[in-house]
Amino acid sequence: MPMLGDLLGAARAGAGNFQAWLRVSDPALAEAVDRAAEANQVTATSFVRAAIADFSRFASEEDWATLSSNLKRTDDPGTACLLAMVDWRLMVKTCRQHAHEPHTGDLADDRP
């Protein structure tokens, strides 16, 4: 099994191609990413990269345990990791801790 750092690096590197792949494999999720990116005034690629960073910084131990467990059951851990992080980011979009500031994609400094 690949090391987590390798998975995160591959996810960051593949973020630009992720949305095109996602449009084919899961159009509903691709649309959700597009809507979230537009709402945050960033590109879909920037949103995906932010999802990776946000998960790395803010995911709970339970989120990490779930991710680790899921990676053991897949033949493509890089894609599974990226999908899980994007899905997680979409689910926490109402939490101020995970909100983006307009135009920058940077995390807001005001924590809950």
Image: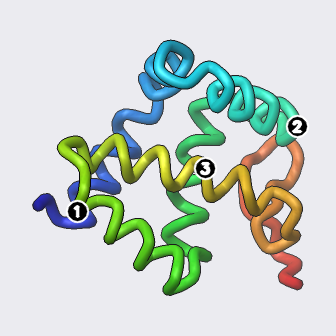
Real-space Cα separation, disc 2 to disc 1, in angstroms:
34 Å
When the figure is inspected, residue 35 is found, relative to residue 6, above or below; the finding is: above
Residue matched to label 3: 87
Say left or right for 51 vs 6: right
Between residue 32 and residue 103, name the one nearer to us.
32
Q: Earlier in the sequence, mark 2 or mark 1?
A: 2
Q: Which mark is residue 39?
A: 2
Disc 2 on helix, strand or loop?
helix
Q: Are the two marked residues, 2 and 1, in contact with CB atoms closer than 8 angstroms?
A: no
Task: Identify which amino acid the numbered label 3 is placed on.
Answer: Asp
Task: Identify which amino acid the numbered label 1 is placed on.
Answer: Lys
The quadrant of the image that shows the C terminus is bottom right
When the figure is inspected, residue 66 is found, relative to residue 51, above or below; the finding is: below
Task: Identify which amino acid the numbered label 2 is placed on.
Answer: Ala
Between residue 39 and residue 89, name the one nearer to us.
89
Disc 1 on helix, strand or loop?
loop
Image color mode: rainbow
Residue at (82% x, 60% y) in the render: 99
Disc 3 on helix, strand or loop?
helix
Pointer 1 local density, CA inside 10 Å: few below 14, some 14–19, many at least 20:
few
Residue at (57% x, 48% y) in the render: 86
Q: Earlier in the sequence, mark 3 or mark 1?
A: 1
Pointer 3 local density, CA inside 10 Å: few below 14, some 14–19, many at least 20:
some
Q: Earlier in the sequence, mark 3 or mark 2?
A: 2
Residue matched to label 1: 72
Q: Nearer the viewer, mark 3 or mark 2?
A: 3
Pointer 2 local density, CA inside 10 Å: few below 14, some 14–19, many at least 20:
few
Q: Nearer the viewer, mark 2 or mark 1?
A: 1
The quadrant of the image that shows the N terminus is bottom left
